[in-house]
Image: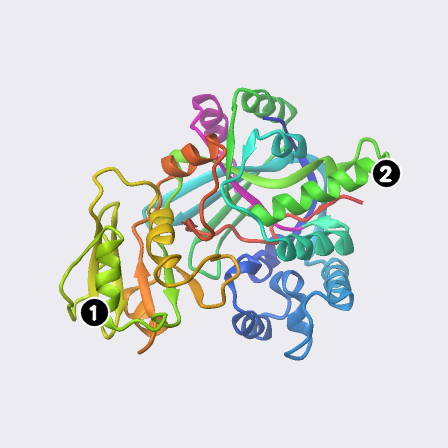
Amino acid sequence: MHIEPITCLRPAREHVAEFAALPYDVFTEEEARSYVKEHPTSFLAIDRPETGFDPGQDPHAQEVYEHARDLLRERQLDRTLMPDEKPCFYLYELSDGDHVQRGLMGAVAVDDYLDGTVKQHELTLKAKELDRVNHIKTLRAQTGLVFMAYRDSVAINTILDAARMAEPLYDFVGPDGVRQRVWRIARPVAVEALQVAFTTVSQAYIADGHHRAAAAARICEERRAEGREDDPAEAFLGVLFPASQLRILPYDRVICDSAGLCEDEFVLRAEEAGFACSAPSDVPCLPEKKGTFGLFAFGAWRTLELRDSDTGLDVSELQERLLGPVLGIQDPRTDPRISFAGNAKADELEQLAGPNGMAFAMFPTSLDELMDIADKGGVMPPKSTWFEPKLLSGLAIRRIW
């Protein structure tokens, strides 16, 4: 892999807790509007600039992106954001209870993304990709972190452990209750050591941020066609974590109806598709192992278990056996009848399904499954993985113009 230190805009220490925000794509429009109303100077106002307009505003109109650009300028003028002009890496640590993960923030070569050194496991949606392209172009900066994993390296861990001995640049609790700590790594010897160490990392895997990475690559290729040289757009902003430290949680499926099937018809079709269905229960049935699913439908819970002893990816098996042929969800990326809930509790799934819908509680995809599929050039269904804790946005804004 090829990584570079970055120069960036970053929040002043006294403003970081109020400015940094959860990623734009974890909010519904209503949630985003509510959060920005309560936190008008947060980065979410820049990341979701449609919140500055009346409901019903086209979020992809050019005036919306220009509003984001204006807000970014305001945050520089009021000194919420300050320039960090000396190239450096940042060590980014998130602590959620007993769970701790530490990653390196820097610029990753677009060529590593294009040649498959940085691997994808999900397809992108062109509309979402274009949204991020327009956001980057109008702000003239990369603002969203691409969250990546790599197989553990003793050398990299040793360098990062040494960086933690200094006083952190930031130490605060984020809006989700997760402790956030950031260290600046600027000593030339440490910067060079990290660059050399990462050349031994043969593969990295996008955990979250497929659309941000695709948008950065698209802009890079456009600018290459213009003949630009020594272009900052040749790299994208990301954080790389050792795989052993990451935590994947369930990403559940909710269908708004039962496709016209009554309870007995659905159970029969599920049995024919290779699932053993338990008796209905008032007690939530959440999966405890691969190949099992919790189903809330028709006012009760059931456990569905694949009869095959050696099944594939759970999200794929569910899609290919039940959601597609039985419930008519042919393309989960575009079908309005399906929605997704990351790490939802049983009562939340019951509420989301309502009296007429269906909720499927999933056993989490493993990181080994993700990496294996990516290594083989495969693609998982959308919303196959839910990583927590989430990286905050707004900690570094990398100008590329």
The mark that comes first in sequence, 2 or 1, is 2
Query: How far from the left and from the top, in percent, is residue 345?
Result: 30, 64
Q: Is residue 185 above or below residue 24?
A: above
Where disc 1 sits, the SS reads helix
Query: How far from the left and from the top, in percent, is residue 306?
Result: 23, 48
Instruction: Please name which of the two marks, 2 or 1, marks the residue nearer to the observer.
Output: 1
Name the residue at 37% across, 60% down.
253
Name the residue at 66% across, 70% down.
50
Query: In the displayed image of the protein, which residue is found farthest to the right?
Result: 227
Where disc 2 sits, the SS reads loop
Residue 162, magenta (yes or no): yes
Bounds of the magenta segment: 143-169
Query: How far from the left and from the top, in percent, is residue 354?
Result: 33, 76
Disc 1 marks a residue whose amino acid type is Asp
Q: Is residue 372 at all visible to an observer of this figure?
A: yes
What label sits on residue 264 in the rendered view?
1
Report if the CB atoms under discs 2 and 1 are less than 8 Å apart: no
Determine whether, in the image, residue 214 is placed left or right of residue 283: right
Query: How far from the left and from the top, in percent, is residue 116?
Result: 58, 30
Determine whether, in the image, residue 81 is placed left or right of residue 298: right
**Foreground: 308 or 219?**
308
Quadrant of the frame with the C terminus: top right
Which residue is tagged 2? Answer: 226
**Foreground: 105 or 285?**
285
Disc 2 marks a residue whose amino acid type is Glu
Q: Disc count in the image?
A: 2
